[in-house]
Amino acid sequence: MRDHGSELGQASVELVALLPILAAVLLASWQGVVAGQAWWLVAGAARAGARADLVGADPLAAARRELPGALRRRLTVRRSGGELVVRLAIPAIAGLGRVGTATARARAAEAGR
């Protein structure tokens, strides 16, 4: 016969050992979602800025209006070779700072062109 007394609590130990790994995977997944949203938002901000630039309005103000309040201060807009380049610092979810930069370029064409 086998003595199973030495295996008591083994499942609990394995679960406790896996919890940090599970937490890290969840945090990394959530950071991926935040980065994807940043790329999506910066593309919309670039389009809005290019449209505003086409009609002579302020492209930075138009681009910032497209973003949620917390991200507006992380946005930069510049003109480069006839197009608008919009950059947004991707916020880190596990602390302060950023994990990268989302960049989008947009050029609005006049009607009939």
Image: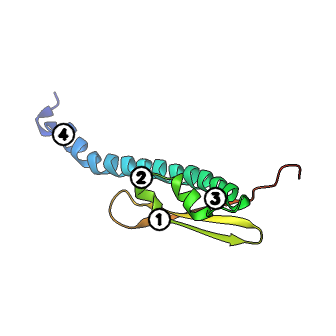
Work out whether residue 45 or residue 30 is closer to the camera in this orientation and state it. Answer: 45
The residue tagged 2 is 28
In the structure shown, which secondary structural element does the residue marked by tag 4 occupy?
Answer: helix
Q: Which circle marks residue 38 in the picture?
A: none
**3D distance between C-alphas at marks 2 and 3:** 31 Å
Judged left or right of residue 106, residue 23 is: left
Q: Are marks 3 and 1 in contact (CB under 8 Å)?
A: no
Q: Marks 3 and 1, how far apart in space?
A: 15 Å
- On screen, residue 112 versus residue 24, left or right, reads right
Residue found 16% across the figure and 27% down from its top:
1
Q: Which residue has dot 4 on it?
A: 12
Q: Tag 1, which secondary structure? A: loop
Q: Using the image, determine if residue 102 lies above or below residue 25.
A: below
Residue highlighted by disc 3 = 49
The kind of residue tagged 1 is: Arg
C-alpha separation, residue under disc 4 versus residue under disc 3? 55 Å
Residue 3 seen in render: no
